[in-house]
Amino acid sequence: MSKITFSFATYQRPFVTPLVTHHGTWEVRSGIIIRIADDEGRVGWGEIAPLSWFGSETLAQAIAFCQEIEKKSLTEAVIKEIPSHLTACQFGFECALEDLYHHPTVAEDSLDYSYLLPAGKEALRACQQERRTTFKWKIGVKPLEEELEIFTQLVPLLQGAKVRLDANGGLSLAKAIAWLKIADETGVVEFLEQPLPPAQFQEMLELSREYQTAIALDESVATLTQLEACYHNQWRGIYVIKPAIAGSPQKLRRLCRELKLDLVFSSVFESKIGRQAVLNLARELGTQRALGFSINHWFKEI
Ligand SMILES: [Mg+2]
């Protein structure tokens, strides 16, 4: 293989409206764009978009790794040996290498996306303005009674669309049961996403067997190592996969082939380079479910 040169630059993109989840408020997306080139003039781009509060390395760790790589020469072997705790780096570098040789692209408008509704009562107005097959709504942000009341008003506005309820691990067992009951009654919920914190895996496993509404793991499966562990602990529900922080795309391909997973591909608010790489993977690996990607309205153009 020919010699590879490498450079990188960091970026910051402010959200139009800060993203409110059970984890807190998120105002600026920071990440790294990497560029590699070989001596035949081919160029490959990749993006490292860490989300440390979700389980990946920090941005500082990723920058330190890029600085280290800058000092030594980059080879395919170095990329294959990126340490397992640097999952966003594994993704960014492997994608850049794939881009160097293939340049795969998927037309973004050829895929089905879920639409992220704002938290709280704002969801009602937004839901009426957008015609989608799938919406997503963050719960566990306001008191249960208030959210159940808003949800009840949301149901007739969906007009045949489904809604994903994402709790970001912020519910108690009693609240999760309240949501599953109303989800079963109304039949409009595609799945309840990460009702309990990852430590309460066993409770979620039991809930997934007790209620009709499907449960999806998200925070529990931030990395492919965690996903494998949940699979081996008998999880047969849905897995939300965020490829940009999950680790090696090669490993993801292997797991998909071997385990036949029910996957939802999701974004971590990466920019165009990372998003394109994730969409390529989603298209290649196939899924019946809408992508968790409806995000263009969330960034200020700078
Ligand atoms: Mg989620």
Image: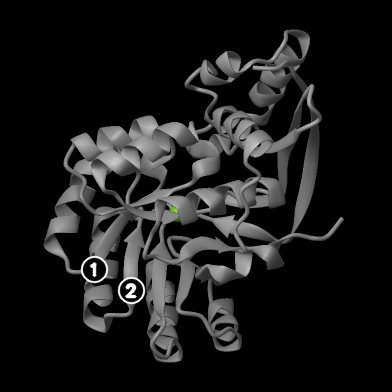
Q: Determine the residue positioned at 55% across, 28% down.
A: 90
Question: Disc 2 residue type?
Answer: Val
Q: Is residue 109 left or right of residue 211?
A: right
Residue 95 position in % (x across, y down)? 60, 36
Badge 1: how crowded within 10 Å, few (<14), some, or many (20+)?
Answer: many
SS class, disc 1: loop
Residue 189 position in % (x across, y down)? 33, 74
Q: CA distance from mark 2 to mark 1?
A: 7 Å
Please identify the quadrant where the C terminus is shown.
Answer: bottom right
Q: Determine the residue positioned at 62% across, 34% down.
A: 92
The circle on residue 213 is 1
What residue is shown with label 2?
189
Residue 234 position in % (x across, y down)? 16, 42
Contact? badges 2 and 1 (CB < 8 Å): yes
The circle on residue 195 is none
Question: Disc 1 residue type?
Answer: Thr
Q: Is residue 119 visible?
A: no
Picture quadrant where residue 93 is located: top right
SS class, disc 2: strand
Q: How many marks?
A: 2
Q: Determine the residue positioned at 19% across, 49% down.
A: 205
